[in-house]
Each structure stands twice: as structure tokens, then as C-alpha cells.
Amino acid sequence: DRFECNVAQDLFVLWNMESPVNMRATLDASYMRQFDLLMNYRRDAAIYTPYVDFEAKLIAPLPANSTALWHARKQSGVLLATAVSNCNDFAGRSFLVSALSARLHSRFINIGKCHRTARLPDGASLEGLASRAFFYLAIE
């Protein structure tokens, strides 16, 4: 089967999870005019698609066991967690991840491919990783 495009009837969606720093074409108005909708992590996108939805947890009241959660995170020893995969950047995130790893040692976890310090166990989630640390850093 051959895919046929009917420009008058089809809806063109750019689904892009990269920063404009890494995908410079998204800064070009003539390039972006090819698409009817933008679907990405930015809140001004036509279709908002966050990496992981932490929003509900941030605006919810603290759970009754918040003291226990604090102590569990303290015992884990993880101060900062992240998932940086793309080392080919122009913004310096590769350098930042490398510096954080060197400075924080075992108190820093990165499961991304860029200067990976840990791997997610089978069946584990990014949200599970973030819950082990005091802070989760999302870099784009």
C-alpha cells in the first residue's frame, strides 16, 4: 500500500519532544507553517504532552505520611535524579550532568544515556526514580 497525502483534508501534526536548541528547525516560521498543530512538552502547544505528569502531586496537599516519605528519601541518600539521554546538545546539559555526577557522586542518579550513572530496573518507572530523590531535574 502506498501512503497518499491529501493536503486539503489531512491534518499535519509535529510531535516533537526536543528543545528548540537541539531542533533549530522549530524556530523557523516557514518550517513550522507545514504543520497544523504542535504536540510537545511546552504548555503553549496545541496538544500538551508532558514527559511525566507530576502536576497533580505538586498541587495536592501533603500526605499524612509526609514525615515518613522525607525519612525514606533521606535514607536513600539520593539528592538529585534526572534522565538526560541526548549528549549532543548546544545548551550545555551534557556538561551539567557530568559536573553534577562528579560533585554529588552516589547522591546523583541519571538513568539517561548521557553520562548514565544507573539503570531503571525492569518494570520500574521514571516516576519511581524521582520518588527516591529529594529533587528531580528535568532538563530541556
Image (tube, grey):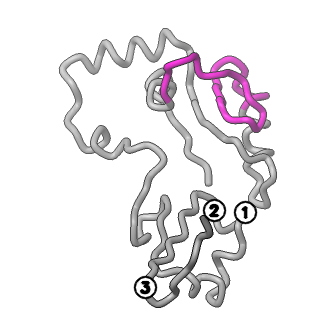
Which segment did they paint magenta? 101-125
Q: Quadrant of the C terminus?
A: bottom right
Q: Amino acid at mark 1?
A: Asn
**Depth order, front residue of 65/117:** 117
Q: Which residue is mark 3?
A: 9
Q: Which residue is mark 2?
A: 19
- Mark 2 neighbour density, 10 Å: few (under 14) some (14–19) many (20 or more): some
Principal secondary structure, stretch drawn in magenta: loop
Q: Which residue is mark 1?
A: 22
Horizontal side of residue 81 vs 37, given as left or right: right
Is label 3 or label 1 in front?
Answer: 3
Is label 2 or label 3 in front?
Answer: 3
Q: Amino acid at mark 3?
A: Gln
Secondary-structure class at tag 3: loop
Q: Quadrant of residue 128?
A: top left
**Depth order, front residue of 106/116:** 116
